[in-house]
Amino acid sequence: MLTPLVDTFKQLRYQVAHLEDGTLDSEYPELSSFIAQHSLKLAEISSDLSFIYQFLYVYGRKSDATFTRFRNEIERFALWCWHLKGCSVFALKREDIEHYIDFVVQPQSDWCSDSVQWRFKQKHGQRVANKKWRPFIYKETKPSQQSLSATFTALNVFYKFAILEEKTFANFVPVVKKNCPYLIVQSQINQPDTLSDLQWEYVLRVTEEHCTDNPDLERNLFTLACLKGLYLRISELSERANFSPVMSHFWQDADGFWFLRVMGKGNKLRDVTLSENFIEYLKRYRQYRGLTSLPRVDEPFPLIHKLRGTGGMTVRQIRRLVQQSFDMAIAALAQDGFKEESEKLTSATAHWLRHTGATHDAATRPLKHLSEDLGHAKLATTDQIYIQTNIKERAKSGIKRKL
């Protein structure tokens, strides 16, 4: 039977300790039974799992998102190696990696579940595995290009790390990716996913209107303002192990300009400029929370607060707030006769708000200023995503061509 291999990042160090001292059965009985059963056929399984834990601990320290993404990919890869290939993850050849990618594109039905399932749950002092958990989520369509690229990235990083640790001396992932028939080379013109003006108007207005009957929706409204107005990623608003966004991260310089200090990708701090319009939403949100109109330098209050409990909110919790506002806008658009706009909004994610804000402002803000607020390391990245200067110049030079 398939069983999850990796718990949460918080529990990972305990899994490492239990695996090393042979006491895994005391806290992870199903996982211990799984290892004992498969060790009879594959002696390397414990060594493989120990190295996987080491890899995930090193890379998982960066962020929860990095840990979750790599855990999901490497976990199912290891299970495929042991279950279906019957060998260590370090005994694979190029053609084996190719076979695994074929499997990812079309996994067996018994490797799939209909929804996201929890892995382990605390019960009687043990971490009990969920029998309904499966490595893949069933979908009628093949994995997206983004999902497939994420698989290659995780495997490539894993084998590069293994080479540095002298666990293996071969990495066949790049050559398999280069010749993969499922990957499509992206077009030069690749517009970011954004909300239309009408969709954004409804998302903002409907949330604002509902605040009258449900004041707690002020959290939703402020979250929307942060994601769209400050171009933030959800992870930059969320509570993390190494960074907790609080109100004192808003600060004002000697000239009266306001900024928000955030931690972005790669644990890089940046200061995002605040617009006058955003400050009005900040004042409104703080009034709802019973705070002074503007932040002080010593305020420890979470940026996005929980209604129950203490501390800031997780990525998943913030994503639910955004989806709640999207759902209200979807219903309002359909009711007002904008059926197509309503249907398109069902595909939107919270990250679209960052793209929407940056795309709207690209026409009026200097590229360098926009790039720094977005947290891009290179101006070329901002230009490529939101402005596409070379493509527009190419279109202008080609518009007068004669047949």
Image: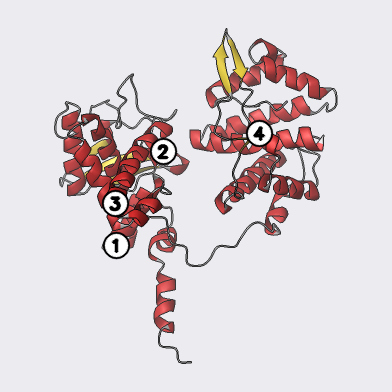
Relative to 365, say whether 301 is above or below: above
Amino acid on which the number 1 mark rests in the picture: Pro
Relative to 21, say whether 46 is above or below: below
Q: Position of residue 355 (x, y in %)?
A: 37, 53
The residue to which callout 3 is attached is 200
Q: SS for tag 3?
A: helix
Direction bottom: furthest residue: 403
The residue to which callout 4 is attached is 75
Q: SS for tag 2?
A: helix
Q: Nearer the viewer, mark 4 or mark 1?
A: 4
In the image, what residue occupies the spot 27% across and 44% down? 225
The residue to which callout 2 is attached is 235
Say whether disc 1 or disc 2 marks the residue closer to the N-terminus. 2
The residue to which callout 1 is attached is 366
Q: CA distance from mark 1 to mark 2?
A: 26 Å
Say whether disc 4 or disc 2 marks the residue closer to the N-terminus. 4
Query: Could you say which is closer to the camera, residue 123 or residue 367?
Result: 123
